[in-house]
Image (spheres, rainbow, N blue to C red):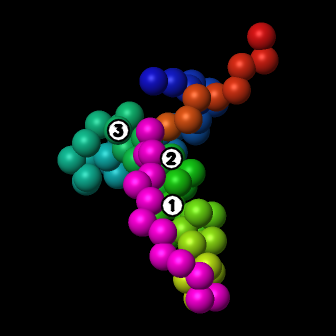
């Protein structure tokens, strides 16, 4: 699992994060993870494969029942 460090975070922002986390019943770290996840991977995002399958179905194509591999892909190495 990756980690990041946020430097120079204003005290007011940190305090607001702590309050928000407390209201949600989780740690500040868990709250930051939830915020980042919701921004980086929103639920309503368009998924290319689903969009293409829908276009194919609307065009009178065939219906594919494909089991998707939901495991995260490995980043490319440049060594």
Judge by depth and name the residue closer to the eye, 76 or 60: 60
Image-quadrant location for residue 48: bottom right
The x, y position of residue 46, in whole percent, is 58, 68
| Mark 2–mark 1 distance (CA, rounded to whole Å) | 10 Å
User: Mark 3 vs mark 1: which is more N-terminal?
Assistant: 3
Tag in front: 2 or 1? 1
In the picture of the structure, the residue carrying the numbered disc 2 is 36
Q: Looking at the image, which residue is at 43% across and 46% down?
A: 70
Q: Find residue 32 and report its horizontal and vertical position in percent.
A: 44, 42
Q: Is residue 13 above or below residue 75?
A: below
Residue at 37% across, 44% down: 31
Secondary structure beneath dot 1 equals loop
- Tag 1 residue: 42
Q: Is residue 11 magenta?
A: no
Q: Residue 60 is drawn in which quadrant? A: bottom right
- Which structural element holds mark 2? helix
Residue closer to the observer: 34 or 56: 56
Whether residues under marks 3 and 2 lie with C-beta atoms below 8 angstroms apart, the answer is: no
State the image quarter where residue 74 is shown: top right
Q: How far apart are marks 3 and 1 (CA)?
A: 17 Å
Residue 75: x and y in percent read 64, 28
Q: Return the residue at label 3.
A: 30
Q: Distance between the residues labelled 3 and 2?
A: 10 Å
Q: Give the range drawn in magenta.
A: 59-71
Q: Position of residue 6 (x, y in %)?
A: 59, 29
Quadrant in which the C terminus is drawn: top right
- Number of residues whose C-alpha sits closer than 10 Å to that of mark 3, classed few (under 14), some (14–19) or many (20 or more): few
């Amino acid at each position: 699992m990756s980690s990041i460090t946020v430097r120079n975070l204003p005290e007011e922002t940190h305090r607001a994060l702590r309050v928000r986390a407390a209201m949600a019943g989780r740690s500040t770290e868990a709250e930051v993870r939830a915020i980042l996840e919701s921004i980086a991977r929103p639920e309503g995002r368009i998924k290319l494969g689903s969009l293409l399958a829908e276009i194919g179905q609307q065009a009178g194509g065939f219906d594919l029942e494909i089991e998707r591999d939901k495991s995260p892909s490995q980043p490319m190495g440049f060594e």
